[in-house]
Image (spheres, rainbow, N blue to C red):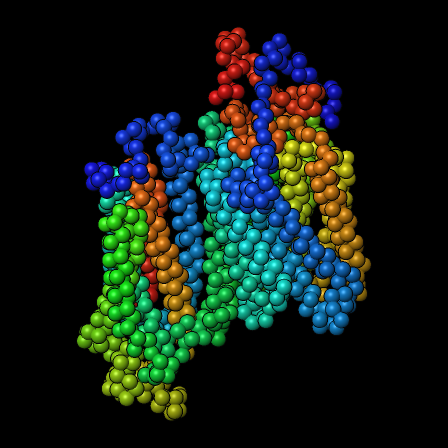
Amino acid sequence: MADAATLDSPETEPQTADHGHGDHHDHHPALEHHFEDLDQQFDAGKLGMWLFLAQEVLFFSGLFAAYTVYRWANPQVFVDAHHHLNTTLGAINTIVLLASSLAIAWGVRAAMRGDRYTILTTHVFTLGCAAVFMGIKTIEYTHKWDEGIGAGNFYKFLEGQHVHGDWMFADYVLGLTVGSLAVGAVVSLIGMVLASNGSRVWGWCVGSVGVSILSLGLGIVIAKCIMLTPLEAEMAAAHGDGHGAHAAHAEDHAAEPAHADVAHASEEGHAEAEGEAAHEEPYTGPSPAERMSFSGPNFFGIYFIMTGVHAVHIIAGMIAILWVIAKAADGQFDADYFLPVENVGLYWHLVDLVWIYLFPLLYLIH
Amino acid sequence: MISQSRQHTLLEAIGEDPSRKVHIPQGPSYLTNPPGTTFWQAVGSWMFTLDHKRIGVMYLCGVMFAFLLGGIYAGLVRVELWNGTPGFLGESLQQAQNNYNQAFTLHGAIMTFLFIIPSIPAALGNIFLPMMLGAKDVAFPRMNLASFYLWCTGAVFFVATLLTSGLDTGWTFYTPYSTTTSTSVILATLGVFILGFSSIFTGLNFVVTVNTMRPKGMTWFKMPLFLWGIYSTAIIQVLATPVLAITLVLLVCERTLGIGIFDPAKGGDPVLFQHFFWFYSHPAVYIMILPGMAVISEVIPVYSRKHIFGYTFIAYSSVAIALLGFLVWGHHMFTSTESALAAVIFSALTFTVSIPSAIKVFNWLTTMYKGAIHFNAAMCYALAFMFLFTIGGLTGLFLGALSVDIHLHDTYFVVAHFHYVMMGGTLIAFLAGLHHWWPKMFGVMYNEFWARIACLLVFVGFNLTFFPQFILGTQGMPRRYAAYKEEFQFLHQLSTTGYFVLGTGLFLAAAVLIISLFKGKKAPDNPWGAATLEWKCCSPPTHHNFEVQPWTGSPYVYDDFVYDPDAEGYVEVLPDLQRDAKPAEAPAAPATT
């Protein structure tokens, strides 16, 4: 409380000292007219949030149901297609989101204790994590685009070919990185200047936006570095998927012996009399690469919708967190009233939880 | 209005102590603004109001407009079907059939999404749910207003659908047709998506309000049954609607991006859409009927002057219907490649829904038994509801039975069945509620005689419209066809005639109510002698509903409400029990707490 008191400008300081717990006649500024007391308002708000979360779970349930139906119907397609996802990036994103959830839970605890400074720092950290997540997702999505793996009609994947001509997102990533780091740094600085000049709310808000943009750049850098490490290239080659082929262009395709053998064998299998060949060959179906080109849309349609809807929720959560930061900087929360902090925290945990399911279901299947 | 033999006078009831008559303080109506308000300030005071009653009134206007629009499309359908050869809706046969497809689709979609689903919960529920709780407002007034504007936005999308290339998928948007047709499927589905969130917000608000804002002394089993019905509805709204929302997102993505979820060429499955759609839309049927049942549970005991029979059974049956409603969606898909085992399970579960529905009907009947029944307009509608809903419910059993459904699937029998439930049920209940609460909402009395005539016309017209459709269906007339064989013509013409009788009845009912707004007598605070809390404030209520917190008694004990000839309505008389023990406190306490 001592920290909070020194941070507050005098005009926004609620008179917490005068508040007796359970004293109904003492009107808290945040108490709305149709509630009897803050307890009732808190119960209503929190129940409302839980119902909203139940609604969100059912919103996602349609996607999970579709996933279940199609994975059950085409298990091999899912195994083939998921090799085109980068597990390391998914894992880092999982860690980033878990860290953000820890931070926001800490922030809610701070709100209960009335520690306003910790509310602000934890929420800015959470916002930063969310932006790192989005940065990494940006690289994942653009990389898919460059490979020709899009959703639905934009799915033009052909093993080892550049389907979009010469126009590649990869060429513009450096500019995107430098741009967001620079803009983020400048905006953060403006925020600090504003804060030191006395406008606390604007300072924290602008600063938080700056941190977000900076973190977006950071996420892009992390993702790009991961994808350039030798380990990733090896893994890509071992899976016989598009990562290695994409990096080294079509000529290097033949340098992946395991993959080429399967493809070659299956072509022969089709050419020869099928009855005899079936006994000799262990597998005569289409190669993973061939399967990818006609069955991939099924997996990636679901992948892009699921992760896309999740990303929309992340962005909505970032806006909500920014709103909490603004209110906290304005000194609107105290130990008696912290409902928005708690509700946004609950929402953020749900966003995290959905990802906890998406990560293994999309990235870690066998 | 009341038989003299049953009526004891106010003087008799209050004995020698006039202060036992509960005085209801009067205040400025929520409909009016303070003197000196300019026109634009008045408009703003409605547009940005957070008062649940004003939002409810705006909803009421909105859904009535939607009902009119949907009704016009129904008329186009019925007039086209006067002859077996299409021609009314277009010059050429092809054109007439295309327009016919559009007319029945828009009739269904508008009636379902814009009218029936919001009608009772969002209009009547919004006004009376907080008042029945003795509360000042719903838990989240801003979200309540947002839900109204979402409804408006959804309605705009529908109007945009009409003005562009229309919609011809049927209200169910089945794939693969909905992914390939050239009509405005995206506009319509976005409209439904937005309306879905309007519905979710309303439901969420109601659940929280009932859970956290009940007055002291009103435990769950002392709530009016209207609240149980609306609460069960709200649970379905919150839990089922998001599944429809994501389904429509997927449908829009399928049309714009071709993501392949429903497209077999990309590994998708068009039947999955039906599963998703009915996972919402079957529970949505209970979103439509449960509020209707809730209204009837209020109306019947009041006009029978008798405590509701089987309170707990009616309360639990609402919850049971809400829960069972989630488990029966497969009965819409008996002919859509469902496995035999799944079909049997869904059929059996479907039959179980009839148990709680029958519990309600029998309890209403038993409530009326030996009651002093007053045939007011609201009660007439309630009786019509019981008759029509029973027919609708029983014919549902034919459709739930596997072998019979194969014959009746997609015939006019289905059309007649769901109109008996949706229109004969929900719409009639809506009218019952509208007449019951009209004096409280607007503070005026309508003309009982003409309201009852309207009710009779609606009842006769309804049966004339839809009963022949049962026969048509069993004879094999398929639904959604503009053309038919000559042998069906007589029944179709009966049905179309019924449409006009029904329409006349509805217009008459509307006229009676609208005229009352201008010429009606001022309503007493409690014209029907009802015991629920919304009648314990002035008519129309003030902005804060209650100037003093009302005394929470049993919602169905009518002994303490006696007719006051001076007020031309009922007044509450406090029990005499403690008069001798504590003469000073007993009369005053309830009025001031």
Q: Residue at x 42, y 48 (%)?
A: A52
Residue A249 in view, yes or no: yes
Left or right, B107 with reference to A221: right
Q: Residue at x 60, y 68 (%)?
A: B183
Judge whether B255 appears above or below A326 on screen.
Answer: below
Q: Position of residue B166 (x, y in %)?
A: 62, 65
Q: Residue at x 70, y 20 (%)?
A: B566
Q: Quadrant of the N terminus of chain B?
A: top right
Q: Position of residue B6 (x, y in %)?
A: 71, 20
Left or right, A18 with reference to B493: left
Q: Position of residue B80 (x, y in %)?
A: 75, 62
Left or right, B105 with reference to B548: right
Residue toward you, B109 or B471: B109
Q: Position of residue A322 (x, y in %)?
A: 33, 52
Judge whether B362 appears above or below B333 on screen.
Answer: above
Q: Quadrant of residue A239?
A: bottom left
Q: Quadrant of residue A100?
A: bottom left
Q: Residue at x 52, y 9 (%)?
A: B583
Residue toward you, B352 or B424: B424
* Extreme-top residue of the structure: B580
Q: How many marks?
A: 0
Residue toward you, B117 or A173: A173
